[in-house]
Amino acid sequence: IPRGFARPPRATARLAEALDLIDRTIVRLAAVGGLEMERTIRDEGWRFLSIGRCLERLLFVTATVAEVAPSEPVPEPARLEWLLDLFDSTLIYRARHTRAPEWAPTVDLLLFDRHHPRSLSYQLGKLAKHVRLLPASGLGDLIREIQLLRMSCHRAAGPLAGLLEAGEDLAVRLSDAIALRYFSHVYEPARATTVL
């Protein structure tokens, strides 16, 4: 067991100690994640890992931005700073904009920037590529939906709430379809059973 994790947490542990432990855990998990992606053979197993990571990020960005989306015209800068930090996008934002975070450029970076690895558009692009390469997937309709949603991101078309909802819905349906097709003994949704 790595040092720092073997100790049981004290009942009187202070918040600073807990946050320090969380920070160290995040760094270690990120290192393990990097090793896993760097050392895994690029076969179907790796492709499923990549798809899972993209789906997770897609769900996370759509749900989080939907929660933070302002009901008022101008959201608080502190909330936007938190959002950028959460998506590891503060440095990219500051490199492009010399002012305090504003809603429009934050949304542009987190949703529509096709080159930013944390953005909605980037995740959709990776999903389209990986799902298309799955063997005998039968997921052509979902691949077309991914491409259409990505095109909506490029044009920044439609209301933001609709885009976020469509992204979340697509991620859930794609996850279910992949699980049913590749990780279930039942290939027809009507015959699948739900485990409670």
Image: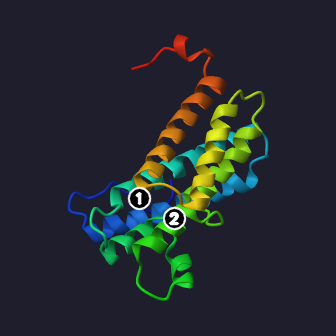
Residue 190, position as x, y percentages in the image: 53, 13
Nearest the camera: 163 or 109?
163
- Callout 2 amino acid: Leu
Residue 126, position as x, y percentages in the image: 68, 51
Residue 14 visible in the picture: yes
Residue drawn at x 55%, y 56% is 120
Image quarter (top left, top right, bottom left or bottom right) of the C terminus: top left
Residue 147, position as x, y percentages in the image: 66, 46
Residue 64 visible in the picture: no
Residue drawn at x 74%, y 39% is 132
- Where residue 181 sits, quadrant-wise, is top right
Q: Is residue 44 rendered to the left or right of residue 61?
A: right
Seen in the picture, residue 39 relative to 132 is either above or below; the reply is below
Residue 186, position as x, y percentages in the image: 60, 14
- Residues at discs 2 and 1 in contact (Cβ within 8 Å): yes
Residue drawn at x 63%, y 35% is 142
The residue under label 1 is 65
The span from disc 2 to disc 1 (Cα, nearest Å) is 8 Å
- The numbered disc on residue 98 is none
- Callout 1 amino acid: Val
- The numbered disc on residue 110 is 2
Seen in the picture, residue 113 relative to 185 is either above or below; the reply is below
| Residue, far top | 191
| Residue, far bottom | 98
Residue drawn at x 38%, y 72% is 80
Judging from the image, what secondary structure is the residue with disc 1 in?
Answer: helix
Q: Is residue 14 rendered to the left or right of residue 169?
A: left
| Residue, far front | 158
- Label whose residue precedes the other's in the sequence (2 or 1): 1
